């Protein structure tokens, strides 16, 4: 059995997790919903929002925040299980490298799908 280096072990654990479970979109959605929620009083007073207009804003605020918190808990549990001490941010080199690998993976999958369609198309 081949012994993996520390970096290879790190990537073998982290990369699948990034691929399938970790996405920054819920955080951005939650921040956007929070900003709209903060403006709600202003909109009620000055723009005449009624219950019909306020309900979607409140629901979006609650659901996006809940989704974000659930993802945070899942990530914290994963970090504890795998003894990961640092969290990647958008400006870190490993994050940028992983993002590039994800883009390349997506590109390769699309090319594979096109090749499959070309091979399976009747002549």
Image (cartoon, rainbow, N blue to C red):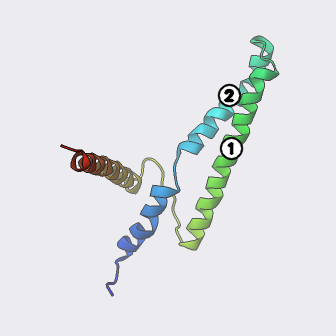
Q: Residue at x 49, y 57 (%)?
A: 20
Q: Residue furthest bottom?
A: 1
Point out which mark residue 65 bears.
Answer: 1
Q: Residue at x 37, y 54 (%)?
A: 93
Point out which mark residue 36 bears.
Answer: 2
Q: Residue at x 57, y 39 (%)?
A: 28
Q: Are marks 1 and 2 in contact (CB under 8 Å)?
A: no
Point out which mark residue 41 bears.
Answer: none
Q: Which secondary structure, mark 1?
A: helix
Q: Give the quarter of the image for residue 3.
A: bottom left
The image shows residue 62 at horizontal and vertical percentages of: 73, 40
In the image, 39: left or right of 101?
Answer: right
Q: Is residue 111 above or below residue 11?
A: above
Q: Is residue 114 above or below residue 40?
A: below
Between the C-alphas of marks 1 and 2, the distance is: 13 Å
Foreground: 51 or 23? 51
In the image, 100: left or right of 122?
Answer: right
The image shows residue 65 at horizontal and vertical percentages of: 68, 43
The image shows residue 71 at horizontal and vertical percentages of: 62, 54
Count of number-bearing discs: 2
Foreground: 8 or 62? 62
């Amino acid at each position: 059995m081949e012994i993996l280096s520390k970096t290879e072990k790190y990537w073998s654990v982290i990369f699948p997790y990034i691929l399938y479970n970790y996405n920054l979109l819920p955080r951005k959605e939650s921040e956007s919903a929070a900003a709209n929620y903060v403006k709600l009083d202003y909109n009620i007073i000055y723009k005449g929002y009624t219950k019909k207009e306020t309900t979607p804003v409140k629901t979006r605020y609650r659901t996006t925040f809940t989704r974000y918190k659930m993802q945070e808990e899942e990530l914290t549990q994963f970090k504890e299980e795998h003894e990961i001490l640092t969290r990647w941010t958008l400006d870190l080199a490993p994050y940028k490298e992983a993002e590039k690998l994800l883009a390349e993976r997506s590109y390769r999958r699309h090319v594979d799908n096109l090749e499959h369609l070309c091979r399976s198309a009747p002549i």
